[in-house]
Amino acid sequence: MLRDKVRTTNALSVNEIYETIQGEGLLAGTPSLFIRIQGCNLRCPWCDQPEALEFGKGRNVSVDDIVARARASPFRHAVITGGEPFTEPNLGRLVKGLLDEGFSVQIETNGTLWSEDIEEVADRIHITCSPKGVADFFVHPKILKHAKELKFVVDDAFTEEVLLKERFRKHLEKGLVVLQPESNREEMISKALSIQRSLSRMGFNLRVIPQIHKLLGLP
């Protein structure tokens, strides 16, 4: 097979690659290399990465080139985000390539899709699932099985009843649920704190964590 054909076959559609801190969820504050995949299967009204939504508008970058870029970074935590990473057929190859280089790997996903290529390494990576209201908070069973945390964006439509759905019970009982106020809006911070207080009365421990990178003025 020709070299350029190999690079195309092993390529992912990438919106951008950059260094920052992880600003969301349980790993907030971790210095990270972000790999943003181009294309998403959902359309959330408050999406803060609209430029990454459309398919076919990213750069095709080979797994080898992405791993080489990661190797040059001083940070050893890689966050694969989007868009929606699970729309990429070569997601498994990228994850395995990064793991082979000694990186800790995190995938941020809306939870609606799954790739069997991830199965064999799923317990070695940190899957952050953010169930979305536009998908009626559906989450693929394999994502629920392997997700290390559930991160819910608290917006005008979000209610505590969502958290009490049976499908989310395991993560709720283990304290692996994060409430993220939409766009760091003051009213959504108040709403998230109110929901946290209500669930605390039921015996559940969940965290309210805003988008820290925005507070610090980072990408």
Image: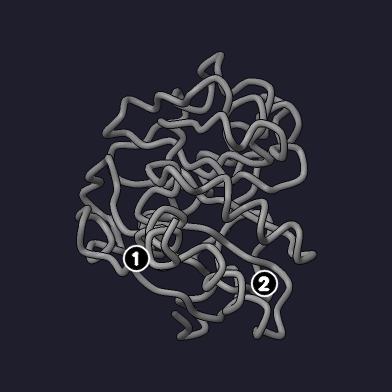
**Pointer 2 local density, CA inside 10 Å: few below 14, some 14–19, many at least 20:** some
Mark 2 vs mark 1, foreground winner is 1
Q: Residue extending furthest front?
A: 1
Residue at which label 1 appears: 60
Which x, y percent locates residue 184? 41, 65
The N terminus, quarter of image: bottom left
Residue 103 place in picture, x, y as percent = 74, 64
Q: Secondary structure at mark 1?
A: strand
42 lies above or below 165:
below
Residue 81 is left or right of residue 128, and the answer is left
Quarter where residue 68 is shown:
bottom right
Pointer 2 and pointer 1: residues touching (CB < 8 Å)?
no
- What amino acid does circle 2 point to? Gly
- Res 118 seen here: yes
Q: Position of residue 59 (x, y in %)?
A: 31, 69
- Judging depth in this view, the residue of 5 and 150 nearest the camera is 5
Figure quadrant of the C terminus:
bottom left
Q: Is residue 65 above or below residue 189?
A: below
Residue at the (51%, 75%) spot, across then down = 213
Whether residue 201 can be seen here: no
Q: Which residue is mark 2?
A: 29
